[in-house]
Image (cartoon, rainbow, N blue to C red):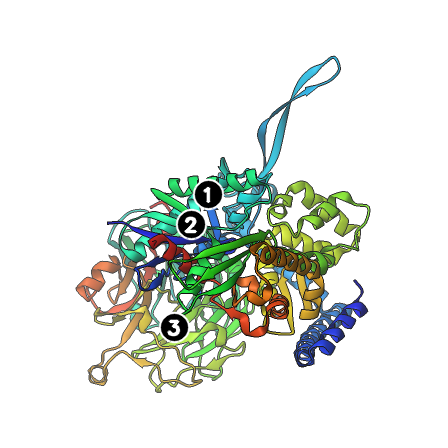
Amino acid sequence: MSVKVGIDFGTSNSGVAVYDGQRVQLLPVDPKNVIPEVIKTVLYITRDYRPSIGQEAVEHYYRDNVNRQRRYVKQWAGEIDVYGADMHYVRDIFVYVDELKSGRLLQYLKTALRKERYEGTQIFERYYTVGDLAQTYLRLLKQRAEDVLGEPIEAVTLGRPVKFSELPEQDYKAQETLREAAHEAGFKEVDFELEPIAAALDYEQTIREPQNAVIFDFGGGTLDIAVMRLGDPNYRKVYASGGVDIAGSDFDRAIIEKRMLAQFGYGHVQHHPEIMEMIYAIPDWMALPEMGTPINKNILEKAIQAGMAPIQLKALQGLIYNDLAFTFYNRVEAGKIALSNAGATIITLEDKDIALWELYTRYQFETDIHHYRTDVEKVLLETIAKSGLEPGEIDAVVKTGGSSNIPLFTEMLTRIFGAEKVKESNAFTSVVAGLAIKAKM
Amino acid sequence: MSFSHKIDEWMKEAETRPESAVTIVRLVAKRLRELTERNEELLTENIALQNGTRVEEYQKRIAHLEYQLDLLKRRFGADESSLAELPSASVETTTLSLLIYNNYGRILRLELNADIQALGRIVDETLQTSEQPRLLAVPSNEEVMLLFTSGRVSTCAVNSIATVETSSEWMWNSAALPDEPRAGEFLVCIMPISRLPLSEFFMQVSRRGCVKKTMTSMAQSILGNHYLGKGTLQKMDQPFDMTLCQKKDLLAFVTIEGKLLGLDVNGLSYSAEERIKLTASDYVIASFVPHPDESFLFVTQTGKVIQRQSDSLELSKSPLAKGQALIPPTRLEQGVRFIGAASVRDVDQIVALDSKGNLSVHPAASIMGAGSIEADGLILTIGLIQAEMRKESDL
């Protein structure tokens, strides 16, 4: 007999859990990770199209790519028709391909689902749609869960944000792409539950009397809020739900844009659009790898030789051409996480040609993301208003998701609801635990 | 954003949360220490650049590389223009040569061009009375370095040594004499030098267990001046063997009374130092650089073979170690002695010279299996033919 599991397909981390009616079992699907029950939502695909996920993918990526050799070859990519007033001709298009590239690392797969203009990506000779990427990740995750349980898994309750997108049609499309991907990954039965509601179901296990609760699910990709009546399984009600696509990845981006770009030439280079384009691509994890072309390398080398911000541009060159982008994003994210417990931290990246050292304080971080706080507070108050309840009528505010630990937002919740009502939950596992409970219902 | 603005922001953090001030100060102090250390390194480098030390170092390195290139050219018999085409067509077909040499500088060169066991016989009265000859298998396109007891060195191409006929009888008088020892001088050993550009050190071992390490970057001046040094400390001691090593290699040597000593090349000093405490009658009879997949093979004068795994080698850190005893005291009293030792793979071959002058080839696997080398008389010395050399020479 097959089992039904709950899967939290998160922006940064994912997880799988199963509920037997009494106890939730979080499955250790990534034994190499510090917390084996949490698996990074990263996918690595090798040149021979062998995929790996989680920490294994990260290790594979580091082993094969960082500071590796590159060799560009010119490849025919297709042709374009050019029409003039009285003429028409066809022109061949060539691209430079790094033939020594051994694999491609993909992260923020969930964000890709809700990106309006992102359909997919070319990985060596194959084109992977967003659905293909999600399907590949879910298939491997399912295999790992089956290995842990020792029995086949054919049904799943997948978590989804309250809003994949503000646009209803894009929101629907994202969910259906994910559903299709799950079917292709081998799940015969697929249903969805909103992530904050899943977190609420997990929280409900800990309370003894009915109460009005706000679930504040603030993860890597989105903020999801649900205002619910919990504690009585016969009368469970969602008063209102809301969300906004602001979360951890946006804060990382803000840190890079405001604090890191100067280290790579921003403010030192002017009137040089090609270099500026490379600098502006740094915060964008999807765009930066695309910058690694031989033409750009030539541009950077010429600029360095001409003495144009040589230290900064050498660092930019190292970041792009030594495949250090993933390490860089991880360092920024680690710095952000450290600020949840400390007043100051260091963001460093030391490698060939790069000597990044940035003392970053909580004051600076809060200044950098201040505008997001305003938006988050607005969405929260709107959702509360939509529920018809007053903040005073809320009995508990349950925080979940990595970004909910940021002190700025904890302070905001404390100010609105009172410190005694703000409850901690397991930031990385409460959603998946709730999804497992939902799967059993 | 200016640096002073950043400092203002750090100050604001300290004002908002005073407990952060300690963290900030600690992080800045740590950075300051790192930068101070780096600054010192850069200042040192700057001084080296200004006083020309660094330039001299690079000039020496360039000279060394040029010399290595020259060696390679000589080895492949190519000029600069054809060197680029290597190794496709310009490499001559090589054969494997066996050099049998005595301390008077006489060298018999045999071409090992067939799979025969009995190679021939040395007919000479002095064979048993004088110091035992030594054997070296080497590709015929090699260049070899000769080391004499005075510390003098010279080089010659193997091809330039006249060959003698296989499966016949030879006399030392008819052997080639590429570099006659000078008055009071004897030939100690011959070493192939094709791997010189890829090696880091010359390692010399003396009869009384002195070792001396010399950087191969000095090879040009060593060969130019024809002098490497004796590598000995005592007056009565004399050099015995020489080999090329890498920094990470181990060096092992074996004495006639059955002592085995292992040394870490990286930990050895550049000056000659005595590394083993030997009895008055004991002396070194073999030295080699062991590799993990090889076995040690020790041969007694009666042809008995003792085998040990290479991981049984214990590294000595003490300046005057006694070494690992391989011959039990009772056997020593009975007169058992080692006459040769080597680090071998199963696929290698051993050449043995017996007291009647017979020279024979034996597969290492079979002698290790049998536990002895069959010979007409006592074994005088052994040599190693590595399987790789055979492959290279297309035998």
Image position of B132 (left or right of A122): left
Q: Identify the residue shown where x is 71% and y is 50%.
A: A279
The image position of residue A198, as x and y in percent, is 44, 57
Residue nearest the viewer, comparing B26 with A131: A131
The image position of residue A74, as x and y in percent, is 60, 34
Q: Identify the residue shown where x is 51% and y is 48%.
A: A109
Amino acid type, mark 3: Ala
Could you tell me how far apart the alpha carbons at marks 1 and 3 are, in whole angstroms?
65 Å
Q: Are marks 2 and 1 on the same chain?
A: yes
Comparing marks 1 and 3, which lies closer to the viewer? 1
Residue carrying label 2: A158
Q: Chain of mark 3?
A: B
Amino acid type, mark 1: Leu
Given contact means CB atoms under 8 Å apart, are the residues at marks 1 and 3 in contact? no
For label 3, count other residues whose C-alpha is less than 10 Å away and answer few (under 14), some (14-19) or many (20+). Answer: many
Residue carrying label 3: B252
Image position of B289 (left or right of A129): left
Q: Is residue A138 visible?
A: yes
Comparing marks 2 and 3, which lies closer to the viewer? 2
Q: Are marks 2 and 3 on the same chain?
A: no
Residue nearest the viewer, comparing A258 with A9: A9
Residue carrying label 1: A178
Given contact means CB atoms under 8 Å apart, are the residues at marks 2 and 1 in contact? yes
Image position of B307 (left or right of A320): left
Q: Quadrant of residue B242?
A: bottom left
Residue nearest the viewer, comparing A257 with A63: A257
| Label located before the other in sequence (2 or 1) | 2
Most extreme residue toward the top is: A86
For label 2, count other residues whose C-alpha is less than 10 Å away and answer few (under 14), some (14-19) or many (20+). Answer: many
Could you tell me how far apart the alpha carbons at marks 2 and 1 are, in whole angstroms?
9 Å
The image position of residue A210, as x and y in percent, is 44, 66
